[in-house]
Image (cartoon, rainbow, N blue to C red):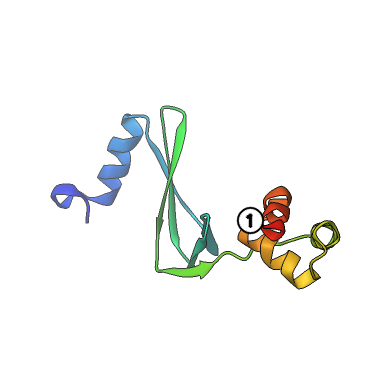
Amino acid sequence: MFPGGMNPKNMQRIMKQMGIKSDELEVKKVIFEMNSKKLVIENPQVTAVEMSGQKTYTVMGEAKEETNETEIPEEDIAMVAETTGKTKKEAENALKESNGDIAEAIENLKK
């Protein structure tokens, strides 16, 4: 409901007079990627509001939490394994723990 029970059309008119443009977007999925997890919102309601040349997006819907899996290139795994003398699995785990940072993975495996 709009403030004070205001009619949505009146609200749109007032916003337009103030230089505020609002559009509903047709969106299938919104994904927020954070360091250690993702928030995935399927079939959200998304509104784009433009005011003073800047756009703001409002997302409404039920979020589902997922953990981020770091994609590690095979070349990186092979290089870390060869450099440290460890197995590819050990190298891959070290790279995942270091979020793909090769130098950190090598350093951790040499300890």
Q: Quadrant of the N terminus?
A: bottom left
Q: Label 1 amino acid?
A: Asn
Task: Between residue 109 and residue 14, name the one nearer to us.
Answer: 109
Residue displayed at 73% across by 51% down: 102
Can see residue 27?
Answer: no
Q: Answer left or right for 69 relative to 72.
A: left
Could you classify mark 1 by the number of other residues whose Cα lies within 10 Å: few (under 14), some (14-19), or many (20 or more)? some
Q: Position of residue 100 (x, y in %)?
A: 69, 55
Task: Between residue 29 and residue 2, name the one nearer to us.
Answer: 29
Q: Element at badge 1?
A: loop
Q: Position of residue 74 (x, y in %)?
A: 82, 63
Residue displayed at 79% across by 67% down: 86
Q: Residue furthest top?
A: 52
Residue displayed at 74% across by 61% down: 72
Can see residue 11?
Answer: yes
Q: Residue furthest left?
A: 4
Vertically, is 89 above or below 101?
A: below
Q: Position of residue 11 (x, y in %)?
A: 27, 43
Q: Quadrant of the C terminus?
A: bottom right
Task: Give the number of callouts.
Answer: 1
Q: Position of residue 3 (x, y in %)?
A: 18, 48
Tell me the quarter of the picture where residue 61 sits. bottom left
Q: Answer left or right for 28 relative to 102.
A: left
Which residue is disc 1 drawn over? 99
